[in-house]
Image: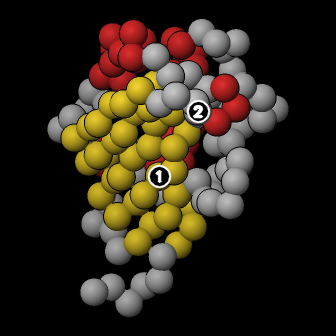
């Protein structure tokens, strides 16, 4: 068991959390990234005006920024969860997701339809990465 305490990962390159949590936590070589929605990190406004492609691109950009802040990259991700407000958007989100995670081994993944996401988002993605 590691004697290094968990460390909060915080970056201005991704939106500030909308609640009492951190963008990510590094614990014993594992990076646990909180879910990202399509918030612009500068304005803190939603991006895309409901356009699932624009939202997904912003979500993946935010998630990558959090990974980078911890010294990780998308190829270090071992598990993701995708939350969609409408599973009919799966094919488009999946195409963009595949591009973001094209290097290395594709992460394990779950994808679910969620009745309501924060700030009216249509997509949210969280992940776990291995930095050990």
Residue 14's spot in the image, x, y percent?
Answer: 64, 42
Provide the secondary structure element on which disc 2 rests: loop
Is 43 located above or below residue 69 in the figure?
above
Q: Which residue lies furthest to the front in this view?
A: 115
Residue 126's spot in the image, x, y percent?
Answer: 44, 43
Q: Residue furthest bottom?
A: 3
The residue located at (30%, 58%) in the rendering is 130
Left or right, residue 11 beside residue 112 = right
In the rendered image, the quadrant that contains the C terminus is: bottom left
Q: Residue furthest right?
A: 43
Residue 116, picture quadrant: top right
Residue 55's spot in the image, x, y percent?
Answer: 58, 20
- The colour scheme used here is secondary structure
Give the CA separation, mark 2 to mark 1: 17 Å
Mark 1 closeness class: few <14, some 14–19, many ≥20 residues within 10 Å? many
Q: Mark 2 points at which residue?
A: 117
Q: Mark 2 or mark 1: which is in front?
A: 2
In the rendered image, the quadrant that contains the N terminus is: bottom left
Q: Mark 1 points at which residue?
A: 33
Return the residue nearer the eye: 34 or 28: 34
Whether label 2 touches label 1, CB < 8 Å: no
């Amino acid at each position: 068991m590691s004697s290094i305490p968990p460390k909060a990962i915080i970056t201005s390159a991704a939106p500030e959390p909308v609640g009492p949590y951190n963008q990510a936590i590094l614990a014993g070589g594992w990076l646990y990234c909180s879910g990202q929605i399509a918030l612009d990190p500068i304005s803190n406004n939603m991006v895309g005006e409901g356009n699932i492609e624009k939202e997904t691109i912003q979500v993946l950009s935010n998630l990558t920024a959090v990974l980078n802040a911890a010294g990780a990259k998308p190829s270090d991700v071992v598990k993701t969860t995708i939350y969609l407000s409408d599973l009919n958007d799966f094919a488009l989100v999946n195409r963009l997701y595949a591009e973001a995670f094209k290097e290395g081994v594709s992460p394990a993944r779950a994808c679910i339809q969620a009745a309501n996401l924060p700030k009216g988002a249509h997509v949210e993605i969280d992940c776990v990465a291995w930095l050990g």
